[in-house]
Amino acid sequence: MKKFGVVLLMFAVLGCAKLNVETKEPIKVDINMRIDVYQHVAKDAESINDQIYGNNEKKINFLFNFSQAYAASVDDLEAAIERRKARAGQIEENFNQGYIGENRKALLEVRSKAAAGIESLVNSENADRQIIYQYTAEKNGVDVSETQKVFFQDDYERASSGWWLEVSPGTWKQK
C-alpha cells in the first residue's frame, strides 16, 4: 500500500510540473498575413478608382487577379464600375459645390439639398460602391468595413481641395 501511495504521490508531483511554451522568436504569421491582405485590398481600391476616375500613369486591370470562384459576380462588379464612371462628373460637380461629402465608410452623404435629384444620385452611387466593397472584401477574405477604410483612404488622397470628408466619427472637414 505504501508503494501505491508513493507512486500516486509521484504522479501528482509530476502532473503539476511547469510547462514552458515560449518560442525562441516571436510568431509573426498573423501580422504578416494582415499586412499582405491590406496591401492587396489597397491595390484593388487603387485599381478600381483608377478605372473610375481615370489615371493615365497607371493602367492596372485588377480584374485579371480574380479567380474563377468570383466569376459569377464579375459582371455585377464591372457594371457597378461602369455606372460609377458614367456619373463621376456629376459626383465631382456636387463635391465641388459642397452639396455632398464622403463619410468614413467611403459612402456619400448629402450635406445640402440645394441640388435637384441629389439624393437619388447619392443613393445610386452608394449602391454601386457597396457592390464594389463587398466584392473586394470577399476576394481578399476581409470584412467589408476593412475594405471601406482602405477605399476611404484612397478617396481621401484623391479628393480635391474643398471637398467635405468625415475625418473622424461625426467630424467633417474640407480638404
Image: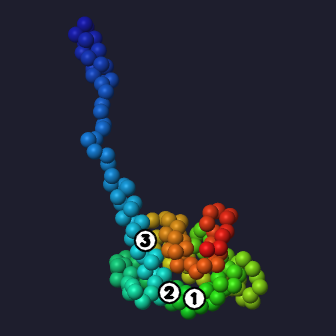
Per the model, the C-alpha gap separating discs 1 and 3 is: 22 Å
Helix, strand, or loop for circle 2? helix
In the picture, the disc for residue 88 is 1
Q: Is residue 92 above or below residue 166?
A: below
Q: Earlier in the sequence, mark 3 or mark 2?
A: 3
Question: Residue at point 48% right, 81% down?
Answer: 49
Instruction: Say if mark 3 contacts mark 2, CB within 8 Å.
Output: no
Of 131 and 6, which appears nearest the observer?
131
- Its colouring scheme is rainbow
Instruction: Say if mark 1 contacts mark 2, CB within 8 Å.
Output: yes
Residue indicated by mark 2: 52
Q: Earlier in the sequence, mark 1 or mark 3?
A: 3
Circle 2 residues within 10 Å: few <14, some 14–19, many ≥20: some
Residue indicated by mark 3: 41
Question: Residue at point 52% right, 70% down?
Answer: 153
Per the model, the C-alpha gap separating discs 3 and 2 is: 16 Å
Q: Position of residue 105 (x, y in %)?
A: 58, 69
Quadrant of the rendering where the C terminus is positioned: bottom right
Question: Residue at point 30% right, 19% down?
Answer: 13
Circle 3 residues within 10 Å: few <14, some 14–19, many ≥20: many
* 145 displayed left or right of 13: right
Q: Is residue 169 above or below residue 103?
A: above
In the picture, the disc for residue 62 is none
What amino acid is labelled 1 in the image?
Ala
Q: Position of residue 98 (x, y in %)?
A: 69, 81
